[in-house]
Image (tube, helix red, strand yellow):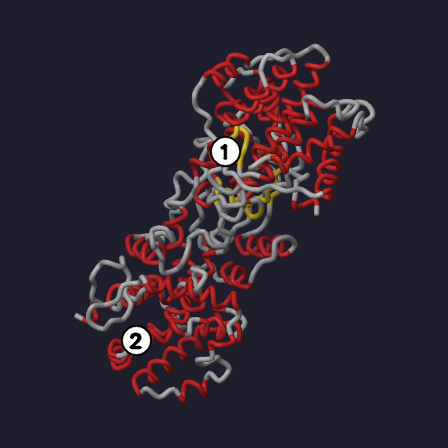
Amino acid sequence: MGANIIVTTRAMSPFEKKAYDNLKKYDGGEYQVKHAKEISRILFGNNVLYKSTPKQLDITQEQIDEYLSHAQVINYRHSDFKPGTFVDRNPYEASFAKKVYFDSEIEFIFNLFISHHNIHAFQDGNKRTALNLFIDLINKLVSLYIRNIFIIQDAQLMYLEKEITHEQFKKILYFEVRAKMFRTNIKCNLEHLIPRSDIEENESNGVISQSDRRSTFNLTDLEKGQFFYEQLRKPIFQRDTNEWTVERLEQLILTFLDDGLIPAIILWEDLDGSIYIIDGAHRISSLIAWVNSDYGKENELNDSNHNAIEEYINNKIGSYEEIKRSKNEKYKWQKQIIAKRSIAVQWVTGDYGKVKESFIRINEQGVVVTADEKELIENDQLPTSKLSRAVLGHGLGQKSKNQNEKTKKIFQRFFKPFLSHELNNYPFAGSLNEDFVISKIYNAIKIIDNGEKLNLLELTEKVETILKLIQDDLNISQKVYFYGATKKHKTNSFYGFIRFSLLLNENAQLYREFIENRKFFEEYLVENERHIQVISRKKRQAKRAYEEISKYYQYLLQACKTNKFNNMHDNFSYLDFGQKLNLTTRERGIRRNYEEFIRVTPRCTKCLGFIDGEENTVKTHICCK
């Protein structure tokens, strides 16, 4: 039940800890209000930046007990004597019960916080407990964060000294909270911060001694232009550095500033002096992002959220550059940590082959290495791997010697325009923000290679040819073929249609039959949208199902041509053909949404098959002209 109301594991910022210290010093006569002028400007200004949305609130006795229990836990943290001991429990309990009288969570939280300055609930630490509980509730119950905690901390003291009223205190609170521009569980795109290597296995068979290598590095080493940062590389097989959330990045920075434990970064140096990160790429990239204030601004991604993340981190923690150069007392502790603290380093010895073995061994002990990852590592010298990395690098800020205008165009065909339901953008390969997106591109390119083991130039040409066939010649509606009832990208359809496209490219007769029967073919796919998913489930995963899905497309095309479906039904007897009466209420709702999703998709003026574009744009497939 507790997890539904409040969070007890939230990381505290240095500013928050300083605010608690100030409140404690105020009790001892060592601290006086410092932000009276800023508070006065807020009170006499006209703008309150946050507006709440009214709704009906309720609360149970069980929830009240949980609030009280959490408050006691907080008081243990802040009380110097008799921690967690109530002076008068009844009025404190009643303050939570009043939730039903408010019409929004934020109004309840604000009034609760202010009321706790009128109640001597605990033996000691009441102001600190009130502020801590307030921040916990803000963090959990509403999508807000506090811009300047010291303004709120001083407002507490001014309210207690009767220098501001209840309503003025509330106005200050409304002014100081900010709506999060994103959920803190969104992922940070940090892939571009450390370049990948183009090292060839036969170029680095030498072994150098690691005995004289540095054992630590500090934050100043991660500033742009510093020698250590400029030497950093990621091996071509290293995971994409875009899996950590904003929350996790924030916690790592706070752990550093709190002098907490950060595991050692594992490195390897080649004969040319480049330093490769074998383990800890997300850790070091998160610190680099903070040090250089780059949370995705140099990415090609249009959804990197750099500005919103920068504002959020700067408000919660502070800007590294500002902290480093400021003489403000509030940054004193952070400056000391930055000046003194370092991150431990361990070194891998051996050649490039040993490094790959080390990477697999290290990661198998922690985050599971998937079969695709292992294959990419072991085959990182093959054209399929090199082309996959080169293509994806265009979107993640990476540069490599394998990149050129063709690989850039392939990237654009896979991912542009970027996925946006609001803008009706449905890219061929889905979102660039998906988990382990390199796997999808790698498998697609392997399907196109089709076991021919083409060299890099030949493979690039073939990939471009197939994508041109799908997108330019056939003008396939990516929305219809590769997005389902939930508007998520269907990887199984993506792989299966790429395989089917190889056959269309090689077989002129099959190509003509597809054009001639396209309307019937595509309407059948829409009507039986679940078939592809069922085939994929039967084969366990999308990359194993693409041959079966391609066969499904072939049998369907023949059925559309002859208007006889017996052969198709026999070969796919496990599919549900035309039995829509068994859908649940939820499934019928999803189906209605999907039908509306497809209804607004434009059609070719000649064959009446689906085509990409706006609903009111008249278009004709190139192959139909």
- Vertical position of residue 418 compared to residue 114: above or below: below
How many tags in the picture?
Answer: 2
The mark found on residue 504 in the picture is: 2
Q: Nearer the viewer, residue 232 or 530?
A: 530
- Vertical position of residue 217 compared to residue 409: above or below: above
Quadrant housing residue 447:
bottom left
Q: Where is residue 532 drawn, in percent x and y?
A: 45, 72
Kindly state the secondary structure of the residue where label 1 is placed. Answer: helix
- Vertical position of residue 117 compared to residue 403: above or below: above
Question: Identity of the amino acid at label 2?
Answer: Leu
Q: Residue at x 58, y 37 (%)?
A: 105
Q: Where is residue 275 drawn, in percent x and y?
A: 51, 42
Residue at the front extreme? 101
Q: Which residue is mark 1?
A: 312
Kindly state the secondary structure of the residue where label 2 is placed. Answer: helix
Question: Identity of the amino acid at label 1?
Answer: Tyr
Q: Is residue 70 left or right of residue 33?
A: right
Quadrant housing residue 296:
top left
Q: Residue at x 55, y 45 (%)?
A: 268
Q: Where is residue 355 drawn, in percent x and y?
A: 56, 52
What's the distance in space between the residues labelled 1 and 2, CA to CA? 50 Å
Q: Where is residue 386 drawn, in percent x and y?
A: 41, 58
The 10 Å Cα crowd at callout 1, few under 14, some 14 to 19, many 20 or more, is many
Disc nearest the viewer among 1 and 2? 1
